[in-house]
Amino acid sequence: MNGSRGPAIGETVRDTGSDRIGIVMDHQGTYVQLRPLGGGREWDADPAHVKPISQSELLSARLAEVNARSKKGS
């Protein structure tokens, strides 16, 4: 996290408001814009609900994304 603006662009975080993990894409107004690990539509998160994740959480989230894509046949 870079302090005043919240997490840095490119950082992977958990949005505790929606219980989703995403990559920080931008800061717009009072919100942080996040994108799902596997790509897709960005969502706005309240910076108060955005928390850094551990390396083990990141690994688990990436594995879950790979497994989900595998089940879809991608």
Image (cartoon, rainbow, N blue to C red):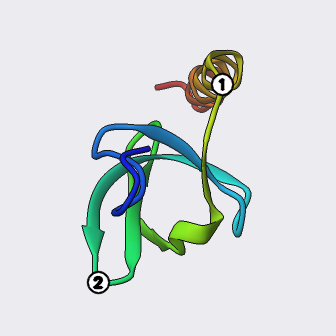
| Side of 73 where 31 appears, left or right | left
In the image, residue 68 lies at what x, y percent?
Answer: 64, 30
| Three-letter code for the amino acid on which mark 1 is drawn | Ser
Image coordinates for residue 62, horizontal then vertical, percent: 58, 23
Q: Name the residue at 54% across, 74% down.
A: 46
Residue found 70% across the figure and 16% down from its top: 56
Quadrant of image for the N terminus:
top left
Q: Callout 2, which amino acid?
A: Gly
SS for tag 1?
loop
Label 1 Cα crowd, 10 Å radius (few <14 / some 14-19 / many 20+): few
Q: Are marks 2 and 1 in contact (CB under 8 Å)?
A: no
Q: Nearer the viewer, residue 59 or 8?
A: 8
Residue at which label 1 appears: 54
Q: Position of residue 69 (x, y in %)?
A: 55, 28
Q: CA distance from mark 2 to mark 1?
A: 27 Å
Residue 36 drawn above or below residue 4: above
Please tell me whether residue 49 is drawn above or below residue 37 in the rendered image. below
| Label annotation for residue 29 | 2
Badge count: 2
Query: Which image quadrant is residue 31 in?
Result: bottom left
Q: Residue furthest bottom?
A: 29
